[in-house]
Amino acid sequence: MNWISKKFRAGVQEVKERTSRDITQVEDVGTLVNENLFERDILLAMKMLASSSNISERKQAIKDLGHLSWSGGPSVAKFAGNQFVNLLSLLNDPNEATALKMLTVHAIGEICCANRENQDKARMYGLLEKLTEFLSTTDNEPDYTALRRSTAACLLTLVCENQENQKALLRTDKLQEHLTSISMENWTAWEENEAAQLITFLGLDYREDSRSRWAKMRALITTAQRET
């Protein structure tokens, strides 16, 4: 990357020397160059993910994809969203390592963070539905627990300020049961318990409280009727 940095600095310096325009325009040129580099690095990461047989290299590639998408801005995230088909293929492959799938789920969350277009694309491409399948896994191996928690965090990102995704997620069978089970796992190594947050965000805890209160009310009414 050193030669790229040198070339970039030389290019900006040339712009400064050739023009008397203000600094904002120079920064705009720099932004354009940086975005192109982000897109190039995303393509390189996807190439490494597809071609390498080294699991460490593939893990790093998927990490790079997520980080580049998140840090590069909306246009870079939109570019990364074009890779959803490939990411879904990876998640559907039973031969792929669970740890790699967990990192892929995390990357999807970064690609969709505060990006409505990518949120919608994830739903339309079937990623939202695929992610819900991971919530029902019961294997207690560390990679599987990490996958479940990463899935909860990713889903929270996908439904944020997106009613269509919220409706689609709420149609998931046994959603509250699975999220409640995940929320009761040990989250001490995580900053937040995203499963619990997702339950609250979707109003599932309120619905449960409402059902519980209604059941108690019906029981009281039935008891009162019997006594009379």
Image: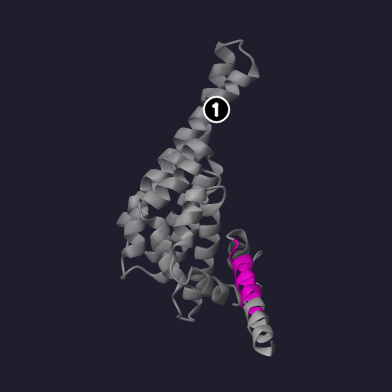
Asked if residue 56 shows in the view, the reply is no
Kindly give the residue lying farthest to the front in the view shown. 228
**At 65% across and 84% down in the image, what residue appears?**
225
Near-viewer residue (181 or 70): 181
When the figure is inspected, residue 18 is found, relative to residue 79, above or below; the finding is above
- Count the numbered circles shown: 1
* Magenta-highlighted residues: 203-216
Q: Position of residue 182 (x, y in %)?
A: 55, 74
Left or right, 226 with reference to 79 = right
Q: Quadrant of residue 56?
A: bottom left
Q: Residue at x 46, y 41 (%)?
A: 117
Q: Which amino acid lies under the numbered mark 1 shown in the image of this protein?
A: Gly
**Residue with the mark numbered 1:** 30
Q: Position of residue 78 (x, y in %)?
A: 45, 40
The residue tagged with tag 1: helix, strand or loop?
A: helix
Q: Position of residue 79 (x, y in %)?
A: 42, 40
Q: Nearer the viewer, residue 151 or 59?
A: 151
Residue furthest bottom as drawn:
227
Here the colouring is: one colour
- The reply to whether the magenta stretch includes residue 215 is yes
* Residue 119 belongs to the span the image colors magenta: no
Quarter of the image where the C terminus is located: bottom right
Please tell me which residue lies in front, 166 or 151: 166
| Magenta segment, prevailing SS (helix, strand or loop) | helix
Give the side of residue 99 with respect to residue 47, left or right: right
Residue 39 appears in the picture as rendered:
yes
Residue 60: horizontal and vertical position, in percent?
46, 58
